[in-house]
């Protein structure tokens, strides 16, 4: 199988040019899905001269099949939960289970924000063009949850930018965004990493360095107080 990209740096350069060509309206914010999306998003943020932040989202798996998502927890300054009601019902993921798993995943989100960003709150997205970046998409379940929360938080325009993804996932995701930028839709689609020559696991130090390379002061008026208790969102996603 021919590889599409040498490494994330190669994918980032190509994707950054495509995003720049879109001439997206400002103000712009670039949000990276850690960890693999961060090195790519950093290149895009520098190319656009835009602030970079992390889009921290954690899957809640089925009680019986942990890899099968029934919900997702998204960091919006407080925990917001998007539940796939159909899957939750089929997998017997009741309210008590979801609350317990929400707290567990929220604790991990807080740990990552402290580790990667010294605990600073997410950048406000209201009224901004938000570019969501990852190093590839497989099913897109957690991405859809994150996009739903960003829309509710007042993003004026949502753009999803990825190097590679399967056509079927992109069809579903196009309904969730204003613009979708993807360099390649290989068929058949293999695991994301098989489309890169070098797809090493991105470590914490690499994430931190990428974030520092795009350090932008947070606007003083945008401080958001974190909630004490997780809040479940009213909206749901479809499988």
Image: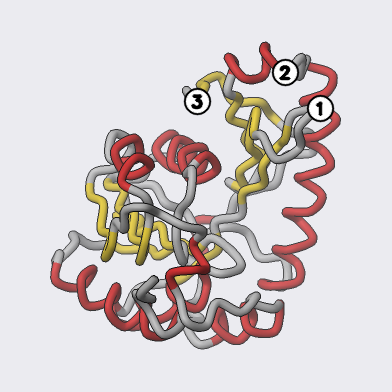
Q: Quadrant of residue 62?
A: top right
Image quadrant where residue 67 sits = top right
Q: Which mark is residue 80?
A: none
Residue corresponding to mark 2 = 91
Q: Residue at x 67, y 42 (%)?
A: 59
In the foreground, 132 or 183: 183
Dot 1: element? loop
3 or 2: tag closer to the N-terminus: 2
The residue positioned 79% from the left and 61% from the top of the image is 111
**Helix, strand or loop at mark 2:** loop
Which label sits on residue 63? 1
- Image quadrant in which you'd find residue 91: top right
Apparent side of residue 89 relative to residue 4 in the rendered image (left or right): right
Q: Position of residue 55 (x, y in %)?
A: 54, 56
Callout 2 touching callout 1 (CB < 8 Å): yes
Is 124 situated left or right of 57 in this image? left
The answer to whether 93 appears left or right of 12 in the picture is right
**Closer to the camera in the image, 101 or 225:** 101
Quarter in which the N terminus is drawn? bottom left
Q: Is residue 85 above or below residue 171?
A: above
Judge the density around disc 1: few (<14), some (14-19), many (≥20) Cα neighbours within 10 Å. some
Look at mark 3 in the image and give the residue it sits on. 239
Q: What residue is shown at x 58% (from left), y 46% (from top)?
A: 76
Residue 103 location in percent, x, y?
Answer: 82, 38
Q: Could you say where residue 177 lies in the image, as x and y percent from the top left?
A: 30, 42
The tag earlier along the polypeptide, 2 or 1, is 1
Label 3 SS: loop
Precedes in sequence: disc 1 or disc 3: 1
Q: CA distance from mark 2 to mark 1?
A: 7 Å
Instruction: Specify few, some or many for label 2: CA neighbours under 10 Å numbering under 14, 14-19, or 20 or more.
Output: some
Above-or-below relation of 203 to 22: below
């Amino acid at each position: 199988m021919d590889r599409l990209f040498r490494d994330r740096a190669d994918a980032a350069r190509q994707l950054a040019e495509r995003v720049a060509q879109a001439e997206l309206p400002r103000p712009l914010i670039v949000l990276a899905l850690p960890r693999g999306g961060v090195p790519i998003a950093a290149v895009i943020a520098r190319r656009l001269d835009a602030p970079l932040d992390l889009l921290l989202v954690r899957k809640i798996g089925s009680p019986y099949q942990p890899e099968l998502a029934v919900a997702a927890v998204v960091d919006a300054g407080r925990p917001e939960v998007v539940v796939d009601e159909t899957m939750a019902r089929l997998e017997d993921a009741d309210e008590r289970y979801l609350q317990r798993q929400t707290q567990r995943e929220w604790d991990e989100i807080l740990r990552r924000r402290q580790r990667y960003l010294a605990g600073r709150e997410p950048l406000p997205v209201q009224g901004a063009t938000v570019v969501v970046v990852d190093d590839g998409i497989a099913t897109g379940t957690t991405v859809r949850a994150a996009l739903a929360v960003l829309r509710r938080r007042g993003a004026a325009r949502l753009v999803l930018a990825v190097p590679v993804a399967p056509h079927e996932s992109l069809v579903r995701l196009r309904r969730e965004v204003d613009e979708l930028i993807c360099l390649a839709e290989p068929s058949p689609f293999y695991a994301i990493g098989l489309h890169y020559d070098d797809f090493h696991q991105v470590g914490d130090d690499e994430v931190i360095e990428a974030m520092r390379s795009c350090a932008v002061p947070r606007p003083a008026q945008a401080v958001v107080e974190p909630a004490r208790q997780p809040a479940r969102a009213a909206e749901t996603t479809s499988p």
